[in-house]
Amino acid sequence: MTHDAPRLLACGNTAFTIEFGAGIDPALSARVLALDAALRARPLPGLCETVPTYRSLTVHLDPLVADPDDLGRTVLALAAAPLPPPATARLWRIPVVYGGEFGIDLDAVSAHHGLAPDALIERHAAPEYRVAMIGFLPGYAYLEGLDPGLALSRRPHPRSVTPAGTISIGGAQALIASIAAPSGWHLLGRTPFQNFVPERDPVFLLRPGDRVRFVPTPAEHWDALCAAAEAGESVAELSEA
Amino acid sequence: MSGVLHLLRLSGAASIQDGGRPGFLRDGLSASGPMDRLAHAAANILVGNPPDAAAIEWGLASATLRAEGGPVRLALAGACGPLRCDGEPLADHRSFLLREGAELTLGRPRAGVFATLAVAGGLALRPVLGSVALHRRAALGGLDGRPLREGDRLPLAGPVPAGEADVGLDPVPLESDRSIRVVLGPQDDLFTSDGLATFLQSIFTVSGQADRMGYQLDGPAIAHGAGGFNIVSDATVMGSVQVSGTGRPIVLMADRQTTGGYPKIATVISSDIRRIAQRRPGEPVRFEAVDLATARTLAQVRAAALDALPKNLRPVEGEAERLMAANVAGAAVDAFRDD
């Protein structure tokens, strides 16, 4: 569901959104990230910050410096032209303990798809994902790349609390949750990896465009990995490709 | 050691806010900062601070504070209630010295929601990501990443400048009877024409679910179009009017979620964020659509009002002003009649 041409949407007088399409798809996400990279490489007067999402880029501006209509048209023209794909190709290997108390919905999701739990784990951990956006709460990483055969609409009743580090799926999206929060998604596992640590420099690790692989990890490793993460060690392997 | 402000009693919401923490929306962190930027600036200017200095933001609160370890110069602006220093009435929107050991009592606001208590010289708190503003959901900033509570001791950044005269400003207007101006979009095309008419022609009221993250409104349901109410999550802005599956609008505010999966029918323009922020639960909200050119002009007017605050400062006569305040508060002051 890609629009023929990107659309300029008004978000009041302090922002606008350039929307490339309505769905979740790697081609859409690539265009969003390419536009984001282009604007970060060459900032325009009055442009304050940009927010990439699955299918659109929101641009925040200083309303006393820039006019959202004028700046919007400039960015829309940029968005309509071919852009080089973003250079970033960092790859994170993130340990995940699946099932049991770590992923309380694993069995139900497996049963829904007619898979053995181990087969579901294998299919969830098989793809190379890409961080399409960080949003909702600080450091929540929304991924594209989920096996379409695992897609599943959200739970009818959200849970009021899900733990930090939850690895979940909702619709065609896969998520790495950074902090405890309510969620209506299906919880498959947990990672000791901490994307958001206010006292750490850098505070956030994952960036839109980063590649991610999940590494199934035995539950016996959980305590040691958590202790390492608490001590400030990186429990996710990072390769700069 | 520098002095502290000791929060002896608190009812309602209170947090530390400064200009906020822009630049991290792409990391999922909204900017926080004052709900009423004009009130925050006015309080700070009254005590000689930069407009965005760290200060205490009160939300429908009443409180008692004591100056310990030294005097402190303070000013309260925005939605104010009765203010008393050691029991003596005091005016808001003016600076005053709270002597060491003296107690300041803030009453619940007579109208509006948010007030800022500014502290001359600022507060000695450690910035996180460049700001001391509390973001409650992220447990970031403020005092230990949480709202203020009874017993807190707020460290003052420095000694009170000696010999400062008390100054005053006209109270910042709360604009409680005015419409909330919006620019339609980004997803107004996902609503029926009836839905848009409901949004622009109805009177909504602020519900009990209203805080620094967002204001949920009560009123008639706004009809979504045939596409339903689920969109692939995209970015929110301060003032986004999101319409959930039940058709109820929510205006997203300073500590909002940075992305959301409900369509956004309109966006409150920057000048009117403080206007809706100051509406309390049960009070009416009527939206009015304007174009971007109007929004720009209104933003310039708002910025000019903020820039004009320093030159609008006027000296206040300590005693007369205090007695005036006593009269306003309804206490008969015989001495004043002899003037």
Image (spheres, grey):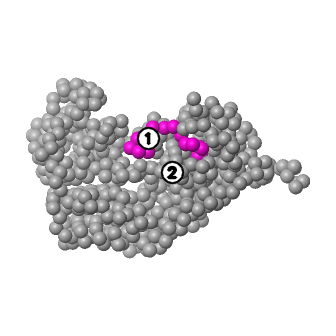
Q: Nearer the viewer, residue B164 or B211?
A: B164
Which image quarter: residue A22?
bottom left
Q: Is residue A230 magenta?
A: no
**Which numbered disc covers residue B52?**
2
Residue A37 picture location, percent across and down: 23, 58
Q: Which residue is mark 1?
A: B127
Q: Secondary structure at mark 2?
A: loop
Residue at the far right: name it.
B338
Comparing B338 with B247, the one in front is: B338
Q: Is residue B118 magenta?
A: yes
Chain letter for mark 1, please.
Answer: B
Q: Report the residue at 16% width, 54% height from top.
A: A87
> Mark 1: which amino acid?
Pro
- Kind of residue at badge 2: Asp
Lower position in the chain sequence, tag 1 or tag 2: 2
For the residues marked 1 and 2, what is the alpha-carbon distance in whole angstroms? Answer: 13 Å
The crowd level at tag 1 (other Cα within 10 Å; few <14, some 14-19, many 20+) is few
Q: Chain of mark 2?
A: B
Q: Residue A235: percent from the left, percent from the top?
A: 21, 33
Tell me the number on the disc at residue A106: none
For the magenta stretch, what is the residue range?
A: B117-131
Lateral position of residue A113 relative to residue B48, left or right: left
